Image (spheres, coloured by chain):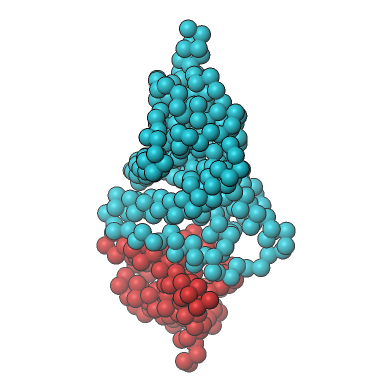
Chain colours: A cyan, B red
Amino acid sequence: MNIGKSLLAFFVIPGLLYAVPMAWLMLWIERKMRARMQGRIGPFFYQPFFDFIKLMAKRPIPRSPFDALLMMGLPVLAISALLASLTLLPVFSTSSGFIGDLVLLIGLIEVPSLCAVLAGFASRSIYGQVGATREAILSIIYNLPFLTAIVALAASAKSIRLTDIALAPSGAVRALTALTVLLCLPVKLRVNPFSLANAEQEIYAGPTTEFDGPRLALWELAHGLEWVALTGIVACIALPFRIGSWIGDIALFTLLSLILVIVATIIAAATARLKISMATHFYLKWVMGMAVLALIIAVLGNVA
Amino acid sequence: MRIIDKLVSLARKRSPWLFHMNTGGCNGCDIELVACLSPRYDVEQAGILLVGSPRHADILCVTGPVTSGTRAALEAIYAQMPEPKAVVAIGNCPATCDVFAGSPAIAGPLDHILPVNVYVPGCPPRPNEIIKGIAWAITILASEEKDSVNKEK
């Protein structure tokens, strides 16, 4: 992966220039779909953009320098990690990547969740701390099936390079992995039925309760980018082929991501929040079962 | 710079987030305020959201006559809201203390404690009137014209 190409991927497609408008679009689709499902009209498409501008223009309450640094630094770190993980996604058939970029991607995709946990505890608010604790518990729980499924896919493709994995011949392992990762989406995105970490009616906004003005704006943007990156990962894993022309590839990637957003939102709007024990049970029994099945099939396929 | 100012002003108009606080009222106005979010009125069309944390909010919606027990919490919540912010007094209680006036347990009315921008009278006011009051508060936010009502006094 040469430097020019990586910079292009980081700043243009699927990085900054593509991901930020896409993040706002996805946040809007989420709110609009939820409103429509509840029989409301819902916000206009520019709503997340204006929310961001308004929050950026607010004058936050002054804090001690270290608090201010921490509260700005954590969302900035989350945003950078998400943009970097988007850079690694094998959207195009020609994007070469490097050996081991799968490991880097998995690491980067966990950074926002870690930042949210730190932010919750750093805010010293009781709601932030409860939210952060829940986020930490859930991130351990969903990572077990998530990582198992990714390992299964890597084992069946016999590679830890994302492009090789994405373009490996399709099979049962890929289908099971895509389904497992898809089931991990709601908990990673903190939407119903796994919206425990930012449970609105219980703990206000969870880890971001104490964040105001531009600091909150950055968290909102990070949340939007999480939607882009995570639906992007599912889209890249689920599709075993690329069209070839870059416009076709990006269109296919975008379309699949948006369909995933709509599916996730419909599930979120139709369900109520589960208790943490129920969420744990669901992930460790059913989703983990599926991931282990994928791993067994992958290993048996390699042996045979 | 003028374009940025215009964009910020437009964004403030299009995305007001409310924080709702009951300072000892009878819950009538609270039900009417929450009714604004229901499918019948659906204020999210105008970008209005009810948020859980005062640090996220632009407009503080106060119902109730401000009892002495809630006064400190009200002041703390107002101080936690980042500028620019507006205060909307919903119902007769925050404006005049209504039937609670003269009670030893009352620290209100609201304008003795906080600068109030908009009063929405009624016991309780209809959701239409509340939306109208919030719309007025939004114009105050967008123009950053503080304490417009208090200045008139």
For the image, the number of numbered tags is 0
Residue at 64% across, 47% down: A118
Q: Is residue A254 left or right of residue B57?
A: left
Residue at 54% across, 50% down: A11
User: Can residue A172 be seen at all in this image of the molecule?
Assistant: yes
A113 is higher (above) or lower (below) than A45: above
B49 is higher (above) or lower (below) than A33: below
Q: Nearer the viewer, residue B34 or B152?
A: B152
Residue at 60% across, 29% down: A100
Residue at 50% across, 21% down: A157
Spot occupied by residue B26 in the image (x, y as percentages of width and height): 40, 68
Spot occupied by residue A119 in the image (x, y as percentages of width and height): 62, 51
Q: Is residue B87 left or right of residue A137?
A: left
Q: Is residue A82 left or right of residue A244?
A: right
User: Can residue A132 be seen at all in this image of the molecule?
Assistant: no
Spot occupied by residue A104 in the image (x, y as percentages of width and height): 60, 35
**Residue A28, quarter of the rendered image:** bottom left
Q: Nearer the viewer, residue A115 or A155?
A: A155
